[in-house]
Image (cartoon, helix red, strand yellow):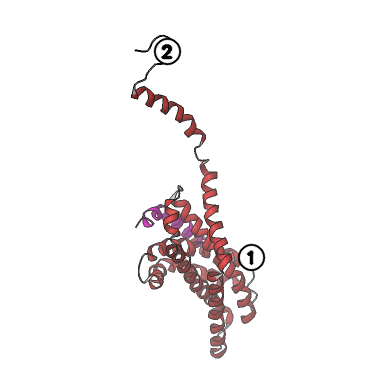
Amino acid sequence: MGTFGGPTTSSPEQKASRLSRSAEPTRTRSAPGGMSRYFQDVGAIIWKDVISELRTKEMLSSMVVFAVLVILIFNFALEVSGVAPDLIVPGVLWVAITFAGILGLNRSMASEKDKGCLEGLMLCPVDRSAIFLGKMLGNVIFMLIVEVVVVPVLSVLFNLPILMPWLILIVVLGTFGFATVGTLLSTVAVNTRTREVMLPVLLFPIIVPLIIASVKATRAIIIGQAWADILPWLQLLGAFDVIFLVVCLLVFQFVIQE
């Protein structure tokens, strides 16, 4: 026993309880900042992708060149066939966007896998859904940059005034849905040997409603149809984006662990 005023000893249980009480305020002070911390993590992943692409410019340059080549091929083919441009331009636009998007999605996730960055992201103390949102929004940004180049080129080559506010909304909605599904499926395909072939095989059957709605809405705007003819396709695009965003956020944490 310790004498009065002298050193005293404590049992291991008492030491553990004192340590737990002293550590509890520290954990409270260092707790993450909720949604603000979540969006900071998302922004950090987007910033990482943007900076990496600005250094190499491999993905954006290949996407832009590929999309412009697709438009040029269709332009020459339509001049020979004599088809009315306003009937075929919506399909040409979304073919170029889709093919360039496939190229970008493959490159985006493959670079993460080849450089070991995907494992690093999984080891980070962030929510898995934040990783998905960061990668998906990064893909949206890259696709929108390509579309800023593609749409004016299409307008000049086919001599059609397609730079309209409602068309911009349709392109954004279609791109968002495409990148949402594509980011999830590119995570699945990147672990296969034939990832360049596997992604289109998995992606195209799912995005058929998105492509149909985008082409129909684009055509309705170009030929000047009534708002009542455009609204159902916009509603379909919005519903597709919301449904698949929720599904992909829930499924991504299981997909990335495989």
CA–CA distance between discs 2 and 1? Answer: 82 Å
Element at badge 1? Answer: helix
Where does the image place residue 182, in percent across and percent down from the top left?
A: 45, 64
Height in image: 137 above or below 99? Answer: above
Height in image: 212 above or below 43? Answer: below
In the rendered view of the protein, which quadrant contains the C terminus?
bottom left
Q: Residues within 10 Å of mark 1 (few under 14, many from 20)?
A: few
Q: Residues within 10 Å of mark 2 (few under 14, many from 20)?
A: few
The answer to which image quadrant residue 185 occupies is bottom left
What's the magenta bit mostly, secondary-structure-wise? helix
Where does the image place residue 116, in percent across and percent down from the top left?
A: 43, 60
- Residue 244 falls inside the magenta stretch: yes
In the rendered view of the protein, which quadrant contains the N terminus?
top left
Q: Amino acid at mark 1?
A: Pro
Element at badge 2? Answer: loop
Q: Residue beneath label 1, please? A: 165
The answer to which image quadrant residue 71 occupies is bottom right
Near-viewer residue (34 or 152): 34
Q: Residue beneath label 2, please? A: 6
Q: Amino acid at mark 2?
A: Gly
Q: Is residue 87 something that shows in the picture?
A: no
Height in image: 84 above or below 117? Answer: below
Residue at x 51% of width, y 47% of height: 38
Where does the image place residue 216, in percent across and percent down from the top left?
A: 52, 71
Height in image: 19 above or below 129? Answer: above
